[in-house]
Amino acid sequence: MKCNEGTIDRALRVIVGLALISLVFVGPKTMWGLIGIVPLLTGAIGFCPAYTLIGLNTCKKK
């Protein structure tokens, strides 16, 4: 798995993931907040399978 996410992309994914997961504990307290695990994990590892499918790469490294 090659890195296909840039630094800003990864940071935004982690922030959005944490915000969605917080919905489980604060606010509407819905289990839909667990969907935040996906952007959190993809941001943490730097690889997005969807980017591979559509041929997108935001990582500056070659």
Image (cartoon, helix red, strand yellow):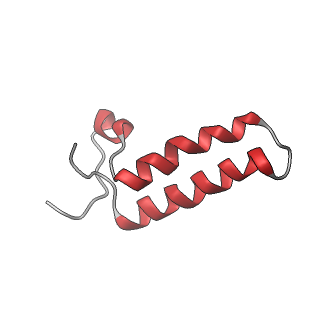
Residue at image location 35% in from the left, 51% down from the top = 45
Tell me residue 22's x, y (percent): 71, 52
Residue located at (71% from left, 35% from top): 32
Q: Quadrant of residue 51?
A: top left
Work out which residue is located at the far front of the displayed protein and give it: 25
Camera-nearest residue between 41 and 58? 41
Which one is nearer the viewer's eye here, 54 or 23? 23
Residue 13 left/right relative to 19: left
Q: Is residue 34 above or below residue 6?
A: above
Q: Residue furthest right?
A: 28
x 86%, y 44%: residue: 28
Image quarter hosting the C terminus: bottom left
Q: Residue at x 25, y 52 (%)?
A: 3
**Which image quadrant for residue 1?**
top left
36, above or below 44, in the image: above
Residue farthest left in this picture = 62
Q: Position of residue 59 (x, y in %)?
A: 27, 59
Q: How many marks?
A: 0
Task: Locate residue 24, reporting x and y percent.
Answer: 75, 44
Residue 30 place in picture, x, y as percent: 79, 37
User: For this view, does 33 lie left or right of residue 57?
Assistant: right
